Image (tube, grey):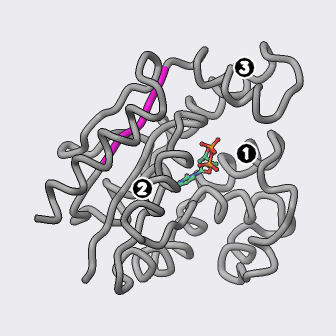
Amino acid sequence: MRFTVAIDGPAAAGKGTISRAVAARFGFAHLDTGALYRAVGVKGGDPVVAAQTLGPQDLAREDLRTGAAGQAASKVAAIPEVRAALVQFQREFARREGGAVLDGRDIGTVICPDAEVKLFVTASPEVRAHRRWLELGGDEREVLADVRERDARDMNRADAPLRPAEDALVLDTSEMGVDAAVQAACDLIAARRR
Ligand code: CDP
């Protein structure tokens, strides 16, 4: 059985939490594609070479979730050759036997336009910054500035900009709790699998 769930959205919208819950519920494999760009961003050297030679040890680094890694990721993610180097791995993961959930920015639009289920998870910048601040700490105003800067870069780049696929279900988690968002995602997947 091949079944792909594409979950896209801006920074700290809840994609990771929803993806992990969905993967556990349906027994699908999960790929956090942001980790690929974070790993390229922190690797140093030529980002295109870093993307072409990315290995398991790069993805096992402990500093991938830091704010600096997020900023570095969104810079290298605007380079078309970096994105191109990561496409095949993501597409193979998406079509693996047993089902897959991929979360990122361009899964429903570029990587898996034929995904069986597409979700676009979003929330206001303030809500997202608050969540990221709870996760990472620091100065909440700086976290908000960081979120806005990264959103602008991700939405305005020429190659694979962040936007919902036309056939994506949009979940705004500003008001909706994450449990309700997980439930909505699970209901949609269950309906499509029949
Ligand atoms: O966890 P968070 O939502 O803050 O970010 P992430 O999903 O780990 O992604 C980090 C950065 O990688 C994003 O700001 C994007 O610039 C880039 N990215 C991308 O361009 N395409 C993807 N499929 C995933 C991430």
Tell me residue 17's x, y (percent). 55, 46
Q: Which residue carries the number 3 mark?
A: 145
Q: Which residues are magenta?
A: 119-123
Q: Identify the element where label 3 is drawn.
A: helix
**Is residue 30 left or right of 56 when viewed as pictured?**
left
Depth order, front residue of 166/101? 101
Q: Are marks 1 and 3 in contact (CB under 8 Å)?
A: no
Q: Residues within 10 Å of mark 3 (few under 14, many from 20)?
A: some
Tell me residue 10's x, y (percent). 51, 36
Given the image, on which type of amino acid does mark 1 rest? Answer: Gly
Given the image, on which type of amino acid does mark 3 rest? Answer: Ala
Q: Quadrant of residue 115?
A: bottom left
Q: Nearer the viewer, mark 3 or mark 2?
A: 2
Q: CA distance from mark 3 to mark 2?
A: 30 Å
Mark 3 or 2, nearer chain start: 2
Q: Is mark 1 within 8 Å of ligand 1?
A: yes
**Is residue 90 left or right of 75 when viewed as pictured?**
left
Q: Which residue carries the number 1 mark?
A: 70
Mark 1 or 3, nearer chain start: 1
Q: Which residue carries the number 2 mark?
A: 22
